Image (spheres, rainbow, N blue to C red):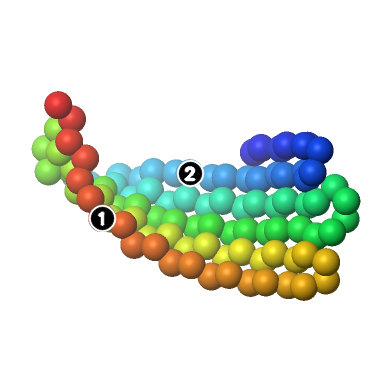
């Protein structure tokens, strides 16, 4: 959880991040972020839902392959105008420990 009260806006958010092992080499890492930002002058607010899921496959103790899918659903209201944005990401890579 986080909260911020700045001069221009108030922000709050909630995050959950978990990790489950299916096998010794395969892990799943689902996450969820919920965000709310409200302008202190009453001109608008921004709401966001950001789920993601990462698959981690350990090749050995030093190298793993990762695949992450993430979506972002953002609704922003400013002075009576509503804007909805939907974005999707797919990332892949590797992690090596030297």
Q: Which of pointers 1 and 2 indicates the residue nearer the eye? A: 1
Q: Look at 64% across and 38% down and name the residue there.
A: 1
CA separation, marks 1 and 2?
A: 19 Å
In this rendering, would 88 be left or right of 92?
right
Q: Nearer the viewer, residue 28 or 86?
A: 86
Residue at image x 43%, y 60%? 70
- Residue 90, position as x, y percentages in the image: 34, 62
Q: In the shown orientation, is residue 72 left or right of residue 88?
A: right
Marks 1 and 2 close (CB-CB < 8 Å): no
10 in relation to 32, above or below: above
Q: Earlier in the sequence, mark 1 or mark 2?
A: 2
> Depth check: 7 or 67 in front?
7
Q: Is residue 15 visible?
A: yes
Question: Is disc 1 surrounded by few (<14), some (14 to 19) or many (20+) residues within 10 Å?
Answer: few
| Camera-nearest residue between 48 and 54 | 48
Per the image, label 2 sits on a secondary structure element best described as strand
Q: Which residue is mark 1?
A: 92
In this rendering, the answer to whether 18 lies above or below 91 is: above
Q: Nearer the viewer, residue 24 or 18?
A: 18
Task: Report helix, strand or loop for mark 1.
Answer: strand
- Location of mark 2 (residue): 17
Quadrant placement of the C terminus: top left
Q: Which percent across, then down, holds residue 25?
A: 19, 44
């Amino acid at each position: 959880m986080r909260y911020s009260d700045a001069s221009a806006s108030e922000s709050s958010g909630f995050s959950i991040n978990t990790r489950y092992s299916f096998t010794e080499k395969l892990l799943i890492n689902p996450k969820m972020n919920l965000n709310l930002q409200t302008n202190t002058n009453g001109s608008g607010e921004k709401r966001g839902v950001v789920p993601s899921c990462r698959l981690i496959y350990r090749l050995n103790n030093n190298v793993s392959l990762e695949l992450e899918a993430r979506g972002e659903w953002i609704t922003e209201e400013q002075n009576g105008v509503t804007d909805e944005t939907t974005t999707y990401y797919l990332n892949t890579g590797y992690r090596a420990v030297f």
